[in-house]
Image: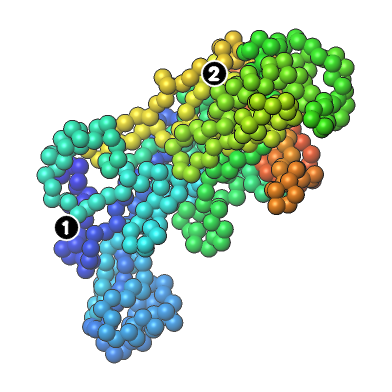
């Protein structure tokens, strides 16, 4: 009775409400705030349907409309169309009606009126985390409600409910679950508790929305993750949609999550990965020097620095400070393309992350794999600074987390725990499974270099935080032109990206930002630096993170 109390109440309701069939039921999805308190993300709302049995309706249809329209929000044309179907025993005229209004409907006591209790999926946050949560809808056959996107889809087997066996012995069901399904979760009914903090999600969504609006971008996104555990606290996308009112959306792509489903060439944000690989491979150190001529040539092509300027003899720290393409090409050459490709694979650039969201895409490093056995170099040169290889924002975030967390490959995840209807629960954790990709000392060294990037170079050092060490890097990538448009790259379309983690030497959070095709602006440092620091300061204050620097 404790476990299935709500179901028994539902059954009792049907004894005095003119309802037919089982009322819709589904498990809940929760956010979790910084204190561990649960906040509803997806639940059920209860109300009533008002319908007509036209076989019992009197001939005075005008009187029916006059009386019912005083209580219900009904359209006259639609009402008269439905009430005119004389032999139809069931025509719905209003849904999601409150209990107070149903009491008024009952008072007028008109023959042929049917009152049916209903439940429907309700999302208290409206727009909040809509592309993470997803929604429910009818399946392709139109005969069953199921999860269609996001967590609703991936965890549909856990969230859906089957009330047909209500009178099965509850204790037998519990012990059957323990013995048969403890290891295999499929088909076990429960609720989903996520790591998403609604305060963080709301703030990051505002920042992302402001970026998208200010620069008139096609899409802007952000991920806030614990780089040590893979727990995701926020995934924000602009534009977005209202989970409770999306029927007017014409482009169904707005329902998907491009943070996991769309792959891009990320550009210079990949340079720290190349540099860390070279350090880990003992090919370079921060002090290693090379002659920067401003360009590099391979296979009949010429690669330039962003400003086409050479800087003479400079070290690897200068390469990151000035985001020099020729510098990471030098690192790749020192490593050799076989070792470089091996590191790209180990960083997970070409594979899915295994995140608990549907429709995840993999990255693409085919150009590297296909040219290992020939003399071509250009693919490896461009890959060293993030062009010619593609990855989703989530793959990128996972790879960058390796720099922050001591060199380990984490598994990003949105869900923290599943609480089953039987009273059992399952906590999601992948920390013990993390693979060591680079040495801890390599992670510490690239972190030190990225802190210097922020303190000395990023916006000329103006964003350095007195009390907190921040490791960060920008990326500005040309957007590839499709083959059917001639291939190559658009001369005027860019993807801007930014990542940073803090406190740098014991990070609590890594924040990744990107915006696609911002207008009338050149570099990611101009579009994303200040929004990143807004998010960083919010997280520091909200979670009361202690300073790691003294003034």
Q: Which of 211 and 494 is in front in this view?
A: 494
Task: Judge left or right: residue 54 versus residue 378.
Answer: left
Task: Judge left or right: residue 367 versus residue 432.
Answer: right
**Colour convention:** rainbow
Question: Where 33 falls versus 292 (above or below)?
Answer: below
> Residue 27: which numbered mark, if any?
none
Q: Is mark 1 on a helix, strand or loop?
A: helix
At a point 54% along the width and 43% down the height, the residue shown is 261
**Residue 223 visible in rendering:** no
Question: Where does residue 182 sit, x and y in percent of width and height?
Answer: 24, 32
Question: Where 499 falls versus 449 (above or below)?
Answer: below
Q: Distance between the residues labelled 1 and 2?
A: 58 Å
Quickly name the residue at label 1. Answer: 12
Q: What element carries label 2?
A: loop
Question: Where does residue 380 sit, x and y in percent of width and height?
Answer: 70, 27
Q: Which of 9 and 218 is in front in this view?
A: 218
Outermost bottom residue: 59
Question: Where does residue 453 sit, x and y in percent of width and height?
Answer: 72, 20
Instruction: Indicate which label's residue lies in the foreground, 1 or 2.
Output: 2
Classify residue 33 by image quadrant.
top left
At a point 36% along the width and 70% down the height, the residue shown is 94
Question: Where 82 falls versus 438 (above or below)?
Answer: below
Question: Where 527 falls versus 346 (above or below)?
Answer: below
Upstream in sequence: badge 1 or badge 2: 1
Q: How crowded is mark 2: few (under 14 residues within 10 Å), some or many (20 or more)?
A: many
**Residue 163 visible in rendering:** yes
Q: Nearer the viewer, residue 476 or 502?
A: 476
At a point 36% along the width and 33% down the height, the residue shown is 417
Classify residue 337 by image quadrant.
top right
Quickly name the residue at label 2. Answer: 437
């Amino acid at each position: 009775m404790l476990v299935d109390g709500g179901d028994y109440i539902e059954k009792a309701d049907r004894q005095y409400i003119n309802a037919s069939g089982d009322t819709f039921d589904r498990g809940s999805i929760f956010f979790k705030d910084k204190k561990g308190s649960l906040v509803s993300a997806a639940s059920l709302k209860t109300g009533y349907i008002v319908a007509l049995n036209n076989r019992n309706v009197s001939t005075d249809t005008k009187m029916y409309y006059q009386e019912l329209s005083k209580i219900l929000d009904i359209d006259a044309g639609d009402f008269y169309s439905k009430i005119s179907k004389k032999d139809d025993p069931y025509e719905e005229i209003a849904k999601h009606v409150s209990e107070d209004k149903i009491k008024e409907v009952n008072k007028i006591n008109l023959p042929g009126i049917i009152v049916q209790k209903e439940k429907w999926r309700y999302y208290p946050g409206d727009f909040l985390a809509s592309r993470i949560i997803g929604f429910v809808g009818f399946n392709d056959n139109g005969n069953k409600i199921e999860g269609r996107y996001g967590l609703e889809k991936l965890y549909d087997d856990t969230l859906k409910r089957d009330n047909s066996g209500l009178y099965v012995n509850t204790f037998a069901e519990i012990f059957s679950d323990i013995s048969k399904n403890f290891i295999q979760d499929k088909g076990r009914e429960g609720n989903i508790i996520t790591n998403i903090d609604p305060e963080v999600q709301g703030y990051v969504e505002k920042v992302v929305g402001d970026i998208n609006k200010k620069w008139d971008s096609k899409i802007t996104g952000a991920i806030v993750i614990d780089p040590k555990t893979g727990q995701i606290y926020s995934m924000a996308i602009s534009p977005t949609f209202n989970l409770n009112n999306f029927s007017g959306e014409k482009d169904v792509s707005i329902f998907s999550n491009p943070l996991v489903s769309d792959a891009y060439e990320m550009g210079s944000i990949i340079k720290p990965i190349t540099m860390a690989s070279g350090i880990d491979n003992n090919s370079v150190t921060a002090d290693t020097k090379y002659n920067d001529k401003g360009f590099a040539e391979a296979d009949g092509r010429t690669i330039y620095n962003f400003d086409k300027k050479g800087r003479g003899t400079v070290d690897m720290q200068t390469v990151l400070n000035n985001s020099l393409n020729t510098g990471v090409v030098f690192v790749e050459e020192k490593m050799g393309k076989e070792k470089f490709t091996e590191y790209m694979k180990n960083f997970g650039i070409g594979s899915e992350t295994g995140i608990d969201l549907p429709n995840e895409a993999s990255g693409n490093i085919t150009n590297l794999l296909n040219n290992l056995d020939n003399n071509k170099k250009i693919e490896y040169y461009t890959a060293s600074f993030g062009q010619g290889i593609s990855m989703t924002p989530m793959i990128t975030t996972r790879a960058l987390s390796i720099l922050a967390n001591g060199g380990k490959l984490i598994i990003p995840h949105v869900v923290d725990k599943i609480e089953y209807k039987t009273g059992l629960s399952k906590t999601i954790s992948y920390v013990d499974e993390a693979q060591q990709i680079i040495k801890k000392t390599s992670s510490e060294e690239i972190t030190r270099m990225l802190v210097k990037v922020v303190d000395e170079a990023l916006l000329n050092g103006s964003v350095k935080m007195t009390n907190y060490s921040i490791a960060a890097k920008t990326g500005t990538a040309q957007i590839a032109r499709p083959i059917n448009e001639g291939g190559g790259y658009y001369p005027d379309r860019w993807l801007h990206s930014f990542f940073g983690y803090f406190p740098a030497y014991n990070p609590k959070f890594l924040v990744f930002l990107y915006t696609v095709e911002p207008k009338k602006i050149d570099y990611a440092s101009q579009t994303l630096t200040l929004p990143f620091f807004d998010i960083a300061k919010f997280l520091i204050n909200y979670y009361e993170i202690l300073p790691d620097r003294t003034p």
